[in-house]
Image (cartoon, rainbow, N blue to C red):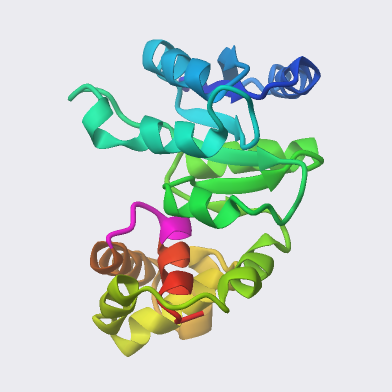
Amino acid sequence: MTTPIRVVIVDDQQLVRVGFQRILETEPGIEVVGEAEDGAQAIEVVRWRRPDVVLMDIQMPVMDGLEATRRILDPAGQAPSQTAPRIIILTTFELDEYVFEALRAGASGFLVKNTPPEVLVEAIQSVVVGGGLLSPGVTAKVIGAFAHRRASDRDARRLATLTEREREVLVLLAEGHSNREIASSLFVSLPTVKTHLAHIYAKLGAKNRNEALGRAVAGGLL
């Protein structure tokens, strides 16, 4: 029997938490193991419940979801045997002023709260195996919103180390293509794409595809 995906729901509105829990409790492969109403509580709940995935609101009292995400994913705050959970950011607005920082903090996904239940479930299933997911339209809006910012020298230097093929993979990634679609587009095998992604993450100092996307935007590639 497959072990269910353990999920913690973090939102300052009880109605939202209850709504998400009712959606997820119908999924046999997902188990809601805790909830919190602010970022500070989220840190404690994650520490004790050790979920695989955290659904994290951004704007909350006491401590917002962005700061909570940073602290939860900070290796210094984790026990040696503890694996950091995947964090999916949830918000009311598709373009939020904190989205870019959330991705740079290491969030694995970003969804609006009116996302259809089946998409929410798919997102949880995707990030738990190392994938990333952005709500439709968010990728282009994030790039557009931050492309005017001055490129980060550090991120630009990192981008300069990428090969031409790695840049092609990163651009396709930013367009929202899956690994399999990237492989088909570039006429290479799926393992080859995964190898390119591993090299990209290492060169950019990124933990996942969304953080790599953030660094590409900050460095001026996208």
Residue 5 coordinates in the image, percent (x, y): 51, 25
Q: Is residue 194 above or below residue 25?
A: below
Q: Residue at x 64, y 70 (%)?
A: 145
Which picture quadrant has residue 28? Answer: top right
Q: Describe residue 137's horizontal placement relative to residue 74 as left or right.
A: right
Q: Describe residue 222's horizontal placement relative to residue 144 as left or right.
A: left
Q: Residue at x 56, y 32 (%)?
A: 64
Name the outermost residue toward the bottom: 164
Is residue 25 in view?
Answer: yes
Residue 53 coordinates in the image, percent (x, y): 50, 30
Q: Residue at x 43, y 12 (%)?
A: 49
| In the foreground, 195 or 9 | 9
Magenta segment range? 205-211
Q: Describe residue 121's horizontal placement relative to residue 173 as left or right.
A: right
Q: Is residue 197 magenta?
A: no
What is the total number of numbered labels drawn onto the structure image? Answer: 0
